[in-house]
Image: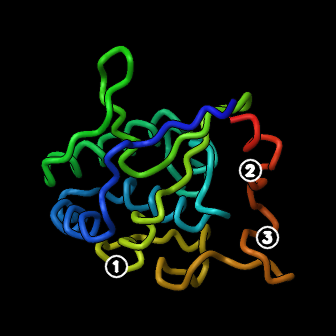
Amino acid sequence: MPNIVQWSRRPTTAQYVAGLKAIAPRTNDIQRRILAAQHHAPERTAYATQLARLANVQGGHPTVNAQYGRLGHMFCDATGLEPDKQEIGTSRWWAVWSLGHSTRKGFIWEMLPEVAEALEQRVLPVSMHSSIFPGRSVATGPPRRSDGSAGWEPAAPPPVSAVDRDRC
């Protein structure tokens, strides 16, 4: 049985645009790079370890997890929205941005389409690290391989396999 974690009261694209505009001055470069890296990932899906490498985040996945959650908390504070709570009573701040797929290899974040659409409206000053996405911006879409498919060459993380997705 799939184990997918998601926000039960997901905001609209317009709410994401308004919320991201409200928090833009308080976001940091790491948070913006993480969102950009996920936005450019194949199917906008990645493990935190992949996002850490792609966004050049020192401290690895623990830093990505913390910054992703902080960003979600800022968004909720600015909009008055509340994320769902875990069974232990803590908020799932990361669920503001993504569906969560639990797999045997770890937790995979799949960016919500409304978040992607809001980012494409350039509501954040997204910093793209040139060695990660040469010549790319959020508005130009994901990088393309030489065969035309979405992804990176040659240092791309493997896309989430159908087997992993079926297991979640």
* Figure quadrant of the C terminus: top right
Q: Mark 1 or mark 3, which is nearer the start of the sequence?
A: 1
Amino acid beneath label 3? Glu
Q: Is residue 50 left or right of residue 79?
A: right
Mark 1 vs mark 2, foreground winner is 2
Q: CA distance from mark 3 to mark 1?
A: 26 Å
Q: Is residue 139 left or right of residue 32?
A: right
Q: Give yes or no for contact between labels 1 and 2 (Cβ–Cβ under 8 Å).
A: no
Q: Give yes or no for contact between labels 3 and 2 (Cβ–Cβ under 8 Å).
A: no
What residue is at 37 percent from the left and 54 percent from the top?
31
- Above or below residue 11? Residue 84 is above
In the picture, residue 11 is in which quadrant?
Answer: bottom left
Instruction: Identify the residue position indicated by label 2 in the image.
Output: 160
Instruction: Identify the residue position indicated by label 1 in the image.
Output: 122
Q: Is residue 58 left or right of residue 80?
A: right
Q: CA distance from mark 3 to mark 2?
A: 16 Å
What residue is at 19 percent from the left and 47 percent from the top?
81
Which element is circle 2 on? loop
**Residue 56 vs residue 104, the one in the foreground:** 104
Q: Mark 2 or mark 1, which is nearer the start of the sequence?
A: 1
Instruction: Identify the residue position indicated by label 3 in the image.
Output: 153
Residue 72: where, in percent of width, then height?
A: 30, 46
Please tell me how many numbered marks the rendered image carries: 3
**Badge 3: residue crowd in 10 Å (few <14, some 14–19, many ≥20):** few
Which element is circle 1 on? loop
Residue 164: where, in percent of width, then height?
A: 77, 40
Residue 116: where, in percent of width, then height?
A: 45, 68
In the picture, residue 126 is in which quadrant?
Answer: bottom left
